[in-house]
Amino acid sequence: MKYLIFFSALFFIAPTVYGSISDELILSDTTVYENPEDPAGYPKGMGAFYLEVQKQIDYPISAFESKLNGKVYISFVVEKDGTVSNVLVERSLNEECDRAAKDIVKKLVPWIPAKNNEKLVRQKMMLPISFDYKARKKFLNKKS
């Protein structure tokens, strides 16, 4: 009789425990892919991304006045919902440009998330943000 009660209890409890374990594994999938099957993308393409950067970046006045040219390499994670997290400077130009590059990557519209095996996944990306005095001056003259 003890065995019957034990196995009956095990029969009813096991699916509950197994279900919660598998749900937990699905929810806590924090793997970050570098090369997923279907990579993350900017909604209107990378050309649109760089155009938005050029339009909206808070170009540091000191960098503009000193005619500073160069690139800040930014890494970040595109989350499963398209938001950006873990924004880091991988290669610096100067403190003000680094901050401006990080800020612009954080504030642009959400990305189209990456997929692997038809499931949304997190993807690490690294992009250069250019600080080009001549291009910025030409852009500002067009706006005027």
Image (cartoon, rainbow, N blue to C red):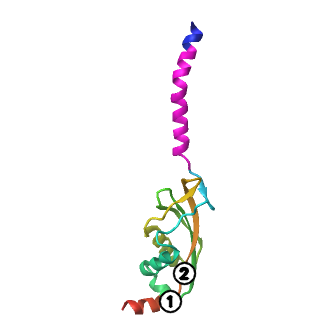
Quarter placement of the C terminus: bottom left
Residue 66 in view in this figure: no
Q: Which residue is mark 2?
A: 130
Position of 76 relative to 131 (above/below): above
Among the 4 quarters of the image, the one containing residue 123 = bottom right
Which stretch did the figure color magenta? 6-29
Does the stretch in magenta take in 59? Answer: no
Q: Residue at x 54, y 44 (%)?
A: 26
Q: Are marks 1 and 2 in contact (CB under 8 Å)?
A: yes
Q: Dot 1: within a 10 Å radius of its alpha carbon, few (fewer than 14), some, or many (20 or more) residues?
A: few
Element at badge 2? strand
Position of 126 relative to 140 (above/below): above
Q: Residue at x 38, y 89 (%)?
A: 143
Query: At which x and y percent is residue 130?
Result: 54, 81
Left-right relation of 37 to 23: right
Among numbered discs 1 and 2, the one appearing first in the sequence: 2
